[in-house]
Image (spheres, grey):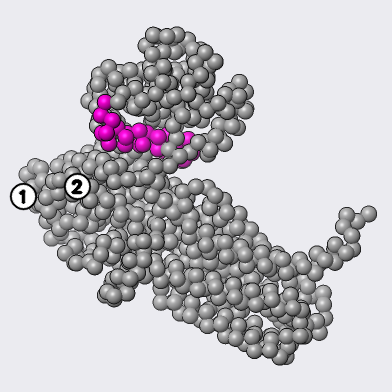
């Protein structure tokens, strides 16, 4: 007994290929639109759509080619409709080439370029087989040739780009590349957007070497320093005395970081490697010309033979032509209005056009989400729906993972946040230069995770434990102190402390690979959340306000109510919740300032940033970008990175002095020997 009737099977056989081809075209439209948006999309919806369409797009095109080849082999050469359908084969090659806005979904796809090369050979062979099987003396045979050429070009471009972005090829290209000379800082730019792109492009080779885990020359470190602070010398940098000037400087530095990471995203995930080159422009011209000429020929052909073919197949073929041209037009607009084009216009001094493009980019382009994710323990644990899962470990573990996505919130990476971080890094940079670029001192600076900012010795125990433990303890303490006092409510150190605290908890919960390794991380995190949930959801309490919950936990820790340790009833190991409450009590008793607390969190942030592999940073570029990545690159380009080869620097006699005089002399002397150092 057959499951489907003969009518259903005949209907499917008739429409199978048509549906697959139209779906393949639809998937390309989705990919070219959403592929570029994921660079600045903060949520998971865009990434889910791109993930589904990216993985299934090649499958749809491949199955369509197989079905088309099978249909061509089962019919006689006199079937005109199948001769028309044979034109679809080169369009499917175009689809396999993919849109310009996305070539790789993840970095790992670049390492699989050999697999795509094999796919190129196989799929082109199948398309050629279909074309030869349908060979006839009609005009359709010759109309398909230009589209076939365009399809091969597109597919070959994708394979070449994947190869160029693979770690081995990227490292080889960097080792053989000639150093790019920095722009003249005294050059007058037409507007700030042009300055960002121009300076960011000349810093981009440094970012590529950081990503490839290659060492950087000491002279490059000085070059990046000058560009990041936008000053000719350290003496000029000292002139930035006002807070407003420092905020502008921090915004400028973070903007340069944003531009560079946008370039890196394009390099790793799009076709920018080839489409912004002369060869790529030639290929693009040939591809567009081929499709347009084929469409014109097809339109002329239909005027004489429209009634000889299926109207449905004629419309589908028209959709494929229009779709291909529309995708090319979209790609062309994206190509023109981009940082790469603006950079080229600045270099070649096309001022009028660059002003127009920079005006469009400043209003329309987003290089990353511009927001940082937030998770808060107290807010999480007061949700009533979590209570039902406490008793069962399996239910709690399953529900915990889902709840993390539901309760994630977002905050803007505003000027105040950038300012406090930049000021902190500037102080570290100052100390490092005063130590005459001592590499051991640099390692010491990068190893601080709160202890250097502590002004009270009695709470140093909180940062002498494992980093993950310290992070959780300080998150709990910061939140309790935030809700337990209103002193200095307008102090932005208080607000930024909590913002960084919630962001670091988010990284711990949802981006753990970006943080230093922590033994039994999952066990300790779940245990802490279950403890807090069990206390805050007790029937006798039923706390609904975070401020009340904070005061209650501190009181319990001081045994004003039932002792907290009795409520927890843990048989083994210390409770991180209890440790966090104890730390909060000490902070409140000692009146630790919010400025100190903020510096502790910034040290934790910078510690995590400097100890995260660049592969992990690059992976997050496709998810809207992580603020931690911006901090990491800012640190590196201010000289706070172990990848700089400082063993080849030279000091002049004047540099034996201390302070900023030492810094300035060091810079001046190093610029005199810059050519020697570069070689």
> Which SS class for mark 2?
helix
Quarter where residue 420 is shown = top left
Residue 553 within the magenta-colored segment of the rendering: no
Q: Is residue 113 above or below residue 651?
A: below
Residue drawn at 36 percent across, 61 percent down: 363
What x and y, as percent, mark residue 150?
Answer: 56, 77
* 675 horizontally vs 374: left or right: left
What x and y, as percent, mark residue 164?
Answer: 46, 64
| Mark before the other along the chain sequence, 1 or 2 | 2
Task: Nearest to the eye among marks 1 and 2: give it.
Answer: 2
Quarter where residue 547 is shown = top left
Q: Is residue 152 above or below residue 37?
A: below
Q: Is residue 369 visible?
A: yes
Q: Is residue 117 visible?
A: no
Residue drawn at 52 percent across, 73 percent down: 328
Separation (CA) of disc 1 from disc 2: 33 Å
Quadrant that contains the C terminus: bottom left
What x and y, as percent, mark residue 535?
Answer: 49, 18
Range of the magenta residues?
487-515
Residue 367: which numbered mark, if any? none
Residue drawn at 30 percent across, 56 percent down: 256
Q: Nearer the viewer, residue 28 or 127?
A: 28
How packed mark 1 is, by other alpha carbons closer than 10 Å (few <14, some 14-19, many 20 or more), is few
Magenta-highlighted stretch: main secondary structure? helix
What x and y, as percent, mark residue 234?
Answer: 13, 51
Residue 506 within the magenta-colored segment of the rendering: yes
Quadrant that contains the N terminus: bottom right
Give the residue pinned by disc 2: 244
> Which SS class for mark 1?
helix
Q: Is residue 80 above or below residue 241?
A: below
Give the residue pinned by disc 1: 654
Q: Nearer the viewer, residue 204 or 363?
A: 363
């Amino acid at each position: 007994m057959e499951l489907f009737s003969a009518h259903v099977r005949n209907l499917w056989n008739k429409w199978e290929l048509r549906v697959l081809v139209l779906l393949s075209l639809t998937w390309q439209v989705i990919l070219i639109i959403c592929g570029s948006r994921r660079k600045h999309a903060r949520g998971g919806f865009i990434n889910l759509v791109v993930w589904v369409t990216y993985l299934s797009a090649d499958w749809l095109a491949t199955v369509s080619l197989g079905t088309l080849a099978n249909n061509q082999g089962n019919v006689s050469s006199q079937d005109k409709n199948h001769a028309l359908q044979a034109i679809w084969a080169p369009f499917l090659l175009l689809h396999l080439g993919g849109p310009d806005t996305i070539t790789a979904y993840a970095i790992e796809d670049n390492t699989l370029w050999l697999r795509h090369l094999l796919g190129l050979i196989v799929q082109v062979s199948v398309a050629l087989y279909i074309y030869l099987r349908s060979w006839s003396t009609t005009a359709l045979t010759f109309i398909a040739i230009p589209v076939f050429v365009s399809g091969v070009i597109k597919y070959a471009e994708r394979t070449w780009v994947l190869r160029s972005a693979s770690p081995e090829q990227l490292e080889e290209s960097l080792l053989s590349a000639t150093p790019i000379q920095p722009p003249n800082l005294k050059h007058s730019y037409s507007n700030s957007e042009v300055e960002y792109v121009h300076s960011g492009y000349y810093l981009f080779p440094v970012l590529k070497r950081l990503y490839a885990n290659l060492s950087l020359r000491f002279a490059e470190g000085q070059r990046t320093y000058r560009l990041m602070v936008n000053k000719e010398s350290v003496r000029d940098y000292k002139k930035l005395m006002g807070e407003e000037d420092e905020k502008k400087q921090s915004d400028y530095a973070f903007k340069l970081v944003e531009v560079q990471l946008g370039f890196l995203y394009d390099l790793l995930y799009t076709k920018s490697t080839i489409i912004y080159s002369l060869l790529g422009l030639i290929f693009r011209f040939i591809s567009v010309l081929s499709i347009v000429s084929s469409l014109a020929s097809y339109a002329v052909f239909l005027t004489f033979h429209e009634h000889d073919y299926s109207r449905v197949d004629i419309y589908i073929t028209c959709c494929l032509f229009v779709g291909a041209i529309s995708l090319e037009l979209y790609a062309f607009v994206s190509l023109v209005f981009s940082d790469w084009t603006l950079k080229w216009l600045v270099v070649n001094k096309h001022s009028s056009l660059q002003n127009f493009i920079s005006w469009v980019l400043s209003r329309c382009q987003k290089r990353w989400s511009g927001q940082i994710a937030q998770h808060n323990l107290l807010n999480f644990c007061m949700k009533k729906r979590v209570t039902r899962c406490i008793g069962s470990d399996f239910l709690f573990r399953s529900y915990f993972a889902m709840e993390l996505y539901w309760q994630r919130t977002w905050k803007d990476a505003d000027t105040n946040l950038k300012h406090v971080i930049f000021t902190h890094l500037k102080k570290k940079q100052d100390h490092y230069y005063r130590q005459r670029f001592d590499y051991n001192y640099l390692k010491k600076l990068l190893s601080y995770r709160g202890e250097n900012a502590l002004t009270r010795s009695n709470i140093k125990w909180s940062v002498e434990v494992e980093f993950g433990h310290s992070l959780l303890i300080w998150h709990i303490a910061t939140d309790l102190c935030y809700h337990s006092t209103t002193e200095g409510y307008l102090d932005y150190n208080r607000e930024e402390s909590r913002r960084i605290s919630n962001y670091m908890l988010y990284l711990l919960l949802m981006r753990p690979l970006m943080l230093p390794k922590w033994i039994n991380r999952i066990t300790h995190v779940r245990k802490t959340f279950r403890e807090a949930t069990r206390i805050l959801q007790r029937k006798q309490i039923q706390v609904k306000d975070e401020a009340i919950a904070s005061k209650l936990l501190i009181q319990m820790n001081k045994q004003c109510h039932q002792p907290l340790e009795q409520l927890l009833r843990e048989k083994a190991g210390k409770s991180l919740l209890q440790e966090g409450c104890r730390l909060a009590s000490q902070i409140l008793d000692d009146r630790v300032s919010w400025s100190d607390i903020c510096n502790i969190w910034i040290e934790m942030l910078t510690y995590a940033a400097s100890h995260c592999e660049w592969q992990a940073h690059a992976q997050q570029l496709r998810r809207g970008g992580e603020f931690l990545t911006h901090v990491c690159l800012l640190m590196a380009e201010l000289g706070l990175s172990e990848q700089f080869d400082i063993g080849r620097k030279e000091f002049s006699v004047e540099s034996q002095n201390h302070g900023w005089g030492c810094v300035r002399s060091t810079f001046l002397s190093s610029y005199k020997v810059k050519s020697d150092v570069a070689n």
